[in-house]
Image (cartoon, rainbow, N blue to C red):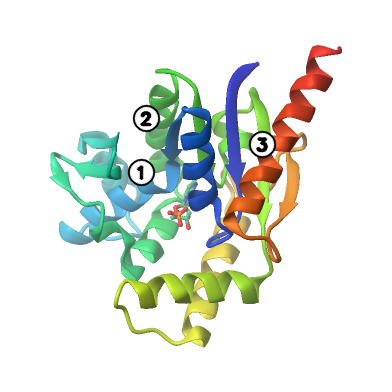
């Protein structure tokens, strides 16, 4: 068993906020697996590589250098040395990431990069297939969910705070479309691992979810030690 935590779940369920805080409290590294797909999507859009060309995209994935570095200012994402931390959060990148994430050739390259990242110490890994495909042997697995209305409100609030204009209805439609694509694809579809603990964060704040997960970690640890 690998001593790490995986958090999977749909878009805007709070995985990254919770994952970052959990990693900070434990002193572990934080792996934002979606950032890898976003980074590649950013490059594909920039180089105008069509999103329906699997071979071209897997070639692009192989030759692109994606780096995640955590500092006191937070996580920064680099593509071939360029800081793309802000740029990859644009809505057009979210959609492109979800389209190319359905390609097995692309996922294979990303899986290697994500496992390599986690090989360098304890991590909290967040995404769609962390507990099911990338780290099936993780010791602690969670599936973080929330009702669509609440997730849309959270994402909408976040966009407004970044100075973006968006209607709540449009945000909701985009989340629905992305979740649908992520959960119905053939490879590594979004879904809880059999041994993941399901957490509904609809009525919980970030601090409450983090406290709940820390409490669950202790319970799981105790039950594993008693075996
Ligand atoms: O989590 P985030 O919204 O940044 O992820 C962007 C997209 O990347 C997701 O909609 C999904 O299509 C893809 N993704 C994935 N597997 C992961 C993480 C993200 O397919 N482990």
* Mark 3 and mark 2: Cα distance apart in space: 27 Å
Label 1: element kind: helix
Label 2: element kind: helix
Q: Do the residues labelled 1 and 2 touch (CB within 8 Å)?
A: yes
Report the residue at 37% width, 30% height from top: 113
Q: Of the residues tagged 1 and 3, which is closer to the observer?
A: 3
Marker count (numbered):
3
| Residue at the spot of label 2 | 113
* Mark 1 and mark 2: Cα distance apart in space: 8 Å
Can I make out residue 92 in this image? Answer: yes
| Residue at the spot of label 1 | 36
Q: Could you tell me residue 60's position as x and y percent? A: 24, 43
Can I make out residue 190 in this image? Answer: no
Name the side, left or right, on which 34 lies relative to 215: left
Label 3: element kind: helix
Relative depth, front residue between 188 and 51: 188
Give the mark nearest the N terminus, 1 or 3: 1
Q: Do the residues labelled 1 and 3 touch (CB within 8 Å)?
A: no
Report the residue at 49% width, 22% height from top: 122
């Amino acid at each position: 068993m690998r001593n790490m935590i995986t958090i999977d779940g749909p878009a805007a369920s709070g995985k990254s906020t919770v994952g970052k805080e959990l990693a900070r409290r434990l002193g572990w590294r934080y792996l934002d697996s979606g950032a890898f797909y976003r980074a590649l999507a950013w490059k594909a859009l920039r180089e105008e590589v069509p999103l329906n060309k699997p071979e071209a995209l897997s070639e692009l994935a192989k030759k692109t250098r994606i780096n995640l570095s955590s500092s006191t200012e937070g996580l920064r994402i680099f593509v071939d040395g360029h800081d793309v931390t802000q740029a990859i959060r644009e809505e057009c990148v979210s959609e492109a990431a979800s389209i190319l994430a359905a390609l097995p050739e692309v996922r294979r390259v990303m899986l290697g990069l994500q496992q390599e990242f986690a090989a360098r110490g304890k991590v909290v890994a967040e995404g769609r297939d962390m507990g099911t495909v990338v780290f099936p042997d993780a010791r602690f697995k969670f599936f973080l969910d929330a009702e669509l209305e609440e997730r849309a409100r959270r994402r909408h609030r976040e966009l407004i705070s970044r100075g973006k204009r968006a209607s709540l209805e449009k945000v909701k439609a985009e989340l629905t479309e992305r979740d649908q694509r992520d959960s119905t694809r053939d490879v590594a579809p979004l879904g809880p691992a059999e041994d993941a603990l399901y957490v509904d964060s609809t009525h919980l704040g970030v601090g409450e979810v983090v406290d709940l997960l820390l409490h669950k970690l202790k319970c799981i640890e105790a039950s594993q030690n008693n075996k």
